[in-house]
């Protein structure tokens, strides 16, 4: 199926996730209110892969936490399959930047852990653990401990653990942010293959615009202070993609230019008075000021 065919299929699919006027305010111990997320409207269709990009403080992780049910909107509503999100559920799993594997358990035991908590019979759980460890190419390391694995292998184990409960929705918060470029590219290819095979709906937070273009059907560009949706960009490029492809780089440059003002806004607030924005075109390279945050 071509990228255009996939996009047409997604467009005809019902909304799996919907944020309607969803906003988030935090109140500190002294009673001061911070508007982390302005009212936003966003729909993610069934089986779609959507990336959220933006500078620190733009609300990327806040959106993810609202969908996950780890936090509640201050106003508006967050819906999954048309039903209000009132807390975490087995239909949604979250994968973070840190693999968070239990060091005293083997890889297989770590992957099986959520099934044990859910009371899944050991015979069924064993079959599912093998299925997903084979899917991420870690079956022969099933008896290894986390400290015996590379960073990329630990993230693959975390991915298998996220998939083993067979959720409808996979929520990913900068899961490859701490890995080297070569490992990232390998995991991008693996994630894309798994997504196409399982038809999961994926909401993926990243600060890396090339990563977003490499993976997404659509990229949601977010602005900051307070967080808001600035633009939604369709990625009409054939799959599989490569981060070094010319078209991927060109679209990433468009996103980087879109974010330049927002990044400079963050830097003005966070660095000393001697800083001045660079003049001229935005140079490709490390995405400064686009790290994690609220």
Image: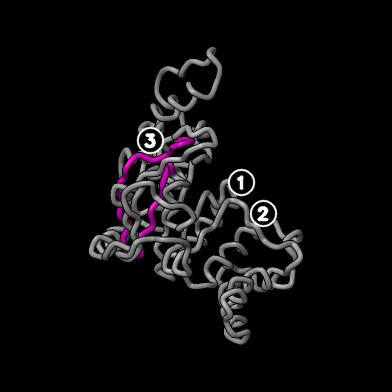
Q: Check if residue 47 falls in the magenta segment.
A: yes
- Confirm or deny contact between disc 2 and disc 1 (CB under 8 A): yes
Q: Is residue 17 visible?
A: yes
Write down the residue under mark 1: 178
Write down the residue under mark 2: 151
- Furthest-bottom residue in this view: 123
Magenta span: predominant SS is strand
Dot placed on the residue nearer the N-terminal end, 2 or 1: 2
Across and down, in percent, residue 215 comes to: 43, 53
- Confirm or deny contact between disc 3 and disc 1 (CB under 8 A): no
- Identify the secondary structure beneath mark 3: strand
Instruction: Name the colour scheme.
Output: one colour
The magenta stretch is 36-59
Write down the residue under mark 3: 223
Disc 3 versus disc 1: nearer the observer = 3
Q: Residue at 39%, 57% (x, y): give it.
A: 49
């Amino acid at each position: 199926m071509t990228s255009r065919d996939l996009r047409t299929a997604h467009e005809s699919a019902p909304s799996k996730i919907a944020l309607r006027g969803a906003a988030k305010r935090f109140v500190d111990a002294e009673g001061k209110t911070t508007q982390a997320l302005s009212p936003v409207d966003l729909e993610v269709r069934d089986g779609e892969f959507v990336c959220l990009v933006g500078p620190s403080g733009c609300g990327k992780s806040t959106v993810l936490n609202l969908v996950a049910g780890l936090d509640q909107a201050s106003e508006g509503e967050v819906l999954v399959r048309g039903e209000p999100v009132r807390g975490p559920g087995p239909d949604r799993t979250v994968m973070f930047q840190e693999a968070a594997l239990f060091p005293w358990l083997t890889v297989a035991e770590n992957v099986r852990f959520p099934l044990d908590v859910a009371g899944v019979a050991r015979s069924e759980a064993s079959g599912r653990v093998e299925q997903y460890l084979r899917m991420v190419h870690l079956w022969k390391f099933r008896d290894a401990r986390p400290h015996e694995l590379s960073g990329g292998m630990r993230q693959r184990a975390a991915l298998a653990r996220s998939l083993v409960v067979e959720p409808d929705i996979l929520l990913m918060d900068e899961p490859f942010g701490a890995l080297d470029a070569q490992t990232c590219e390998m995991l991008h290819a693996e994630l894309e293959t798994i997504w196409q095979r399982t038809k999961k709906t994926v909401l993926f937070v990243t600060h890396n615009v090339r990563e977003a273009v490499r993976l997404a059907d659509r990229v949601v560009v977010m602005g900051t202070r307070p967080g808001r949706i600035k633009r939604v960009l369709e990625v009409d490029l054939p799959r599989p993609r490569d981060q070094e492809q010319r078209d991927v780089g060109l679209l990433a440059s468009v996103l980087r230019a879109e974010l330049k003002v927002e990044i400079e806004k963050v830097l003005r607030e966070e660095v000393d008075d001697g800083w001045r924005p660079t003049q001229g075109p935005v140079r490709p390279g490390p995405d400064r000021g686009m790290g994690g945050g609220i």
